[in-house]
Image (cartoon, rainbow, N blue to C red):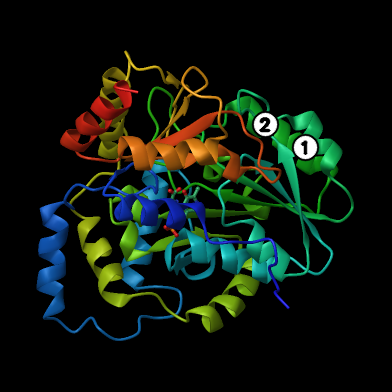
Amino acid sequence: MSKLPHISTSIFTVMSKMAAEHNAINLSQGFPNFPVDERLTTIVAKLAKENVHQYTPMSGYPPLLSKIVTLVKKSYGRTLQADTELLITAGATQAIFTTILALVKTNDEVLILDPSYDCYEAPVLLCNANPVRVALNDDYTPNWEIIEKACTPKTKMIIINNPHNPTGKILKQSDFESLEILLEKYPDILVLSDEVYEYITFEEKHISAHTRKKLLNRCVMISSFGKSFHVTGWKVGYLVAPEYLMKEIKKVHQFLVFSVNSICQVAISDYLDLVSVDEIGKFYQEKRDYFRQLLKDSRFKLMPCEGTYFQVASYAAISNENDVDFCKHLIVEHGVAAIPISTFYDDGKDLKLIRFCFAKDNATLEEAAKRLCAI
Ligand code: PMP
Ligand code: GLN
């Protein structure tokens, strides 16, 4: 008997495979296709010959921990205790899984705001707990009244994803105020704040849970160097949690992975001396603007995009078929892969929306746009 009867192969795997089979331009799964910064690959080549190939301490390579402390201080003014509040993880996926496994118990409820990224539900189910899916408003802002109505004495955790995959929305000051009012009424609820795109925001600056004093003692904040340094395959991320939660999280982490890929941790640590994360928002803002400009005469209607490297588009003016079928036809007949937005909803709501990833070199974006404009 399956422990996860309703979970199937991730849509990102399905669409990337189909894109490869049909030699389509892959704007589906979120990953950059341009070369990694040469300074980073040079560091890796140099490190390969050094003594960096054995286990790091369980919590992470100590110089990397110190540099994250400096980064968080510089970005958000928060002073972290490296030894008790910080943990390097095998990407954000493992951070999320480990956090849920460590903190959620049988019959607890975990609020997930739909549309939602795909990796939250399975660990909740494996804890014999209940995912409670709550719809965001039509403009993808959280509806705090509905969220509050969904809270019960069993609610253990609310998961927020900011900036938001797939919609590119970012949470506003007023959202945090509403969240904090709600948390005052429910003192046992924890927050898992998935901020993997924290440095990829555009006109408006990202508001991190790190900056919310009322959240700090009950929030696990998660980030990923895969997004910030264009190395999604390295799977190096981190989580920040107050000491009493971190103690529990580390109990799980030590038996799930023990420690994370040493050479990549050292490389990121050395690279952090050379780069500023401030550059990445501007970099992707230019990509977003370029992609939107290229599609302006197409029949796709582009939704607003405040952050992340995803652009949601409506194809309602083109076709009436459901979004999964539309994406399949898009690959087979037009040579472009995208992600159907219905897969981010519990009930598969079909809104005739699809998601494009614009973390691609300009030539790829141009060719994709040429094909999309011809539809
Ligand atoms: N959360 C969100 C919102 C994501 O988009 C992703 C990956 N794209 C992850 C978590 C997982 O990140 P990682 O690849 O570092 O595991
Ligand atoms: N997070 C990536 C996306 O949203 C996918 C990562 C994966 O395939 N697990 O496209």
| Above or below, 203 relative to 98 | above
| Above or below, 252 relative to 81 | below
Is residue 163 in sight in this rendering? no
Left or right of residue 303: residue 122: right
* Disc 1 residue crowd, few under 14, some 14–19, many 20+, Cα 10 Å: many
Is residue 95 in sight in this rendering? yes
Determine which quarter of the picture holds residue 50.
bottom left
Quarter of the image with the N terminus is bottom right
As drawn, which residue projects farthest toward the top? Answer: 297
Locate residue 244, reporting x and y percent: 66, 67
**Which comes sooner in the sequence, label 2 or label 1?**
2
Please state which of residues 265 and 211 is positioned toward the viewer in this rendering. 265
The kind of residue on which mark 2 rests is Pro
Left or right of residue 64: residue 321: right
Please state which of residues 84 and 297 is positioned toward the viewer in this rendering. 297
Residue ID for mark 2: 142
**What residue is at 52 percent from the left and 21 percent from the top?**
316
Residue ID for mark 1: 147
Locate residue 132, reporting x and y percent: 77, 49
Q: Is mark 2 within 8 Å of ligand 1?
A: no
- Give residue 356's mark: none
**What residue is at 30 percent from the left and 69 percent from the top?**
265
Marks 2 and 1, how far apart in space? 8 Å
Question: Helix, strand, or loop for circle 1?
Answer: helix
